[in-house]
Amino acid sequence: MVSAKNIIYLDAASTCPLHPKVLSELIRIEKNYWANPSSIHNLGIQSLDVLERSRFTIANCFNVSPSQVVITSGATESSHLAIRGVANKLKPGRIVISSVEHPSVIAAAFSLQQNGWEVAKWDVDNHGLIDLNLLDELLSPPTKIVSLIWGQNEIGTIQPVSFIGKECKKRNIFFHTDATQIISQGLFDFNQLSIGSFSASAHKFRGPKGIGILIIAREYLELIDPIQGGGGQEHGLRSGTQSPSLAHGMAIALKQIPVHISINNQEINFSHTRTTILTKELSSKLSNIKGLEFIGHPFTRLPNIISVLVSSRNNIPVSGRSLVRELSNYGILVSSGSACSSNTSKPNNVLESIKVDNKMLGSSLRISLGSWLTELDLNYITMTIFNSIEKITHNY
């Protein structure tokens, strides 16, 4: 076994360690402001004040009003609330999702079928980018809802969310995006995107688990139905007792993100940070290892994710799961695909969508970096990946 002090954590796309400031603030708030924020006694009012100050901070990070911020348990719930909540207000039509969506969005979309909705998938190219030649076809009636993942969590490809948002707005189509993987790489002005809503989970940007956000455009605030009944918290959209400490922890985590993202119609520009620089350096080093095939878009991609298919010197596929376990023995923690899908035996729909050869579907490796990594780690990572592949394939 490897102790927590001797690991190199390269699975940021799965979850991130709490930022030290978040941890200390979580303890402080939970110790002093533990009352139910819906209670009208003094302790409840103090807890509510913490909650609403946190909402105000979150709103400022994305240049929206606090009324546009719905605090949820995470991106999965947020995406379901956006998609199903809007669908409940509309007559059945068509919802369009990409063929490389997160499982939560796929589930939300297909749950509408029982109410008469049609689900269409927007095909992607070999790099995971949506085919814009299909735009007019897919955004024509009866399409009423579109949901596209902004930064793909397995292969890193980024979709032209700002451009699609504008096209949907022209056609009066509600557009939602899963922005979970984007926010750790920089904050952005919600109003630049022309979108209906976006979802995110705090633990992807060094906040606590079990909390997330749904940011909704003003014009849609009255056009979303709650998907669960209860006490009517969160502007009546998300019933359930709120956690001031988790909300505060999420707000503190957002305040630690020092950079902003520049967005135009079809491109997104990330600021150069230590994480993005180290990712490029590690990618360059890994390119010298025979048997690694880089996947995802080469340029339009998340700047902290490296995705590869792994084969032996004899071009025999290497099990991604076996490689993950072998690297873990040496203190290097990576993943093979999405953690959210790791417990299923179903084929990997993302790799199938980008037309990976069937024999390589189980041979993916995802390396996702965070701000805690140092340059001193890079050579050890590269050497250990090379040696682990050699060890696994020794008898091939």
Image (cartoon, rainbow, N blue to C red):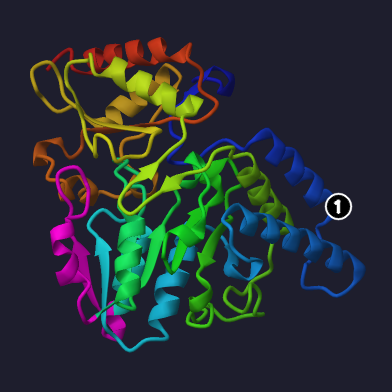
Q: Is residue 93 above or below residue 289?
A: below
Quarter-of-image position of residue 280: top left
Residue 133 in sight in this render: yes
Q: Circle 1 sits in a helix, a strand or a loop, which is it?
A: helix
Query: What residue is drawn where x is 31% and y is 36%?
Result: 336
Which range is magenta? 113-142
Q: Residue at x 14, y 44 (%)?
A: 126
Q: Answer left or right for 151 relative to 206.
A: left
Q: Amino acid at mark 1?
A: Asn
The residue under label 1 is 32
User: Which sits in the foreground, 115 or 325?
Assistant: 115
Side of 273 relative to 314 (left or right): right
User: Residue 120, image x and y in percent?
Assistant: 20, 69
Total count of labels: 1
Name the image quarter holding the C terminus: top left
Residue visible at 38% across and 49% down? 340
Note whether 166 is above or below 151 in the view shown: below
- Residue 339, percent across and down? 39, 44
The outermost residue toward the bottom is 91
Label 1: how many residues lie within 10 Å, few (<14), some (14-19) or many (20+)?
few
List x then y, in percent, for residue 277: 43, 23
| 322 on left or right of 178 | left
Q: Which of 394 and 180 lies nearest the eye of the viewer?
A: 180
**Eyeballing the image, is 3 above or below 107?**
above
- Identify the residue at the far front of this view: 264
**Left or right: residue 190 compared with residue 389:** right
The question of residue 219 being in magenta is answered with: no
115 falls in the magenta region:
yes
Vertical placement of 278 versus 138: above or below?
A: above
Q: Quadrant of residue 23?
A: top right
Image quarter for residue 19?
Answer: top right
